[in-house]
Amino acid sequence: MTEKCGVVGVSLDGREAARPLYYALYALQHRGQESAGIVTHDGFQQHSHVEMGLVGEAFEEDDLDVLKGGAGIGHVRYPTAGSVDSSCAQPFSVSFKSGSLGLSHNGNLVNADEIREELAALGHAFTSDGDTEVIAHDLARNLLEEDLVRAVKRTMQRIHGSYALTICHDDTVIGVRDPVGNRPLCIGELEDGYMLASESAAIDTLDGELVRDVRPGELVVLQADGDGFDSYQLLEREQTAHCFFEHVYFARPDSIVDETLVYEARRSLGRKLWEESGVETDVVMPVPDSGRAFASGYADAASETTADGESRAENDDGVEFAEGLMKNRYVGRTFIMPTQDERERAVRLKLNPIKSTIEGKTVTVIDDSIVRGTTSTQLVQLLKDCGAEEVHVRIGAPEIVAPCYMGIDMATREELIASDKTTDEIRETIDADSLAYLSTEAIAEVLGTKRIDLCLGCVTGEYPFDIDGEATDRDVTRPDLGGKTLHADD
Ligand code: SF4
């Protein structure tokens, strides 16, 4: 399971944007490793450098030197919609009659094909099959007739799906978040300007201050003199649909997403996991690195109460927290392994157990999710081979039963182990002594929100968008495209 993209944008007074963007992309590298790119504007012309590879591989010193101008946007990408090749690498840039546009997109449109067909019929030529180019063409077309704010609103009224966008229109940098705020985007203040980023960790990297999240349906326009930003609430919905997996898995633990520090959210989810399904074992250990905060919260809660919810006796320390698995950081992430056989080998390469913390003990191992079940099966086997007497598995999220259409590369329904197996059947498959997941109610409680204000599509099979052949969890329909290009609803 992997996040798809990270976006960033800066507008600085008297300083080149390229290096701050480069550093910010480093901070967002976990959100995409396939390609990296930066587009800047110097007030006269647009400059672009987009390459396949990690941020450190995509840019040489010279590349940054030619990216002139104090305004710019950046992007790291792992592909979801569109081909796995350089034609879909971003930022996407285009020049048209009334200027230039650079676009960075995190998310996925579910009606991109309809809009592409419509625009192609009007004479637009597309160079990729990605949805970002569709947004760029739609916006460019609207900019021929409208000012920036009205043009963005018109495009927002036509596109349906998840998007957090940073856009460079000539030397104006803007940020846009879809009306339900599915993907994260925040605003930061720097010494000499303002920035936008998928995660606040990118703002920290530039010694900036997090101002706030971009609101769902909001357009933020960074002022060119670096003095501030203007806000336009262009679309409003009754409910939000924040992706809960940002907190569970995707975002960096040191990021604040939708006003919640991800590390604290994960610790609290770990505490909930103990309350809901704690089991008294000798040790609890995380699957590194993603399970660490959950396991530490779980062990904390276990030191206060027993699995039955009773207060601990004074001489009872609860379940010991131990680092029983070491991660080899130089092995590729399992999801890029194309065959099942290679994936299985990768788990063995990636995790090495510390025998003394496992041998002869009852063990609880905590992870953030089970996708195909391959990793969990290997892991339980690994711990048993190391002499664990019992292996109990606890997961800091509910069962993933359905795919994601909002820009997360997850797996097909057929590949998801929980799509057609009960929890006990999964337990049997992975050969654990017990298995428990966190409830959706616990997620909503920890994130301090109502269930309906979260996207829970992949764990309920009901989505906050109108997706062909899938159920929805709210009253939602795709925009009617007819005529919107020519007649914007003010
Ligand atoms: S379906 Fe799941 S992964 Fe995708 S946006 Fe919704 S909660 Fe996030």
Image (cartoon, rainbow, N blue to C red):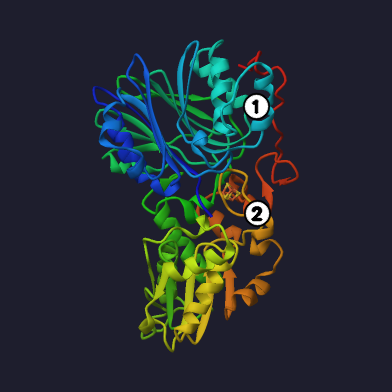
Residue bearing mark 2: 412
Which of 182 and 22 lies nearest the eye of the viewer?
22
User: Count the marks: how many?
Assistant: 2
Q: Residue furthest right?
A: 469
Image coordinates for residue 487, horizontal then vertical, percent: 66, 13
Rounded to the nearest angstrom, the CA distance separating label 2 from label 1 is 25 Å
Image coordinates for residue 396, horizontal then vertical, percent: 52, 63
Please, what secondary structure does the residue beneath circle 1 have?
helix
Q: Residue furthest bottom?
A: 360
Does residue 278 appear in the picture of this structure?
no
Badge 2 vs badge 1, beta-carbon distance below 8 Å = no
Image coordinates for residue 244, horizontal then vertical, percent: 54, 51
Does residue 162 appear in the picture of this structure?
yes
Quadrant where the C terminus sits is top right
Disc 1 under 8 Å from ligand 1? The reply is no
Question: Looking at the picture, which amino acid does disc 2 mark?
Answer: Thr
Q: Which mark is residue 116?
A: 1
Q: Residue at x 45, y 56 (%)?
A: 265
**Viewed as shown, does residue 174 lie left or right of 402?**
left
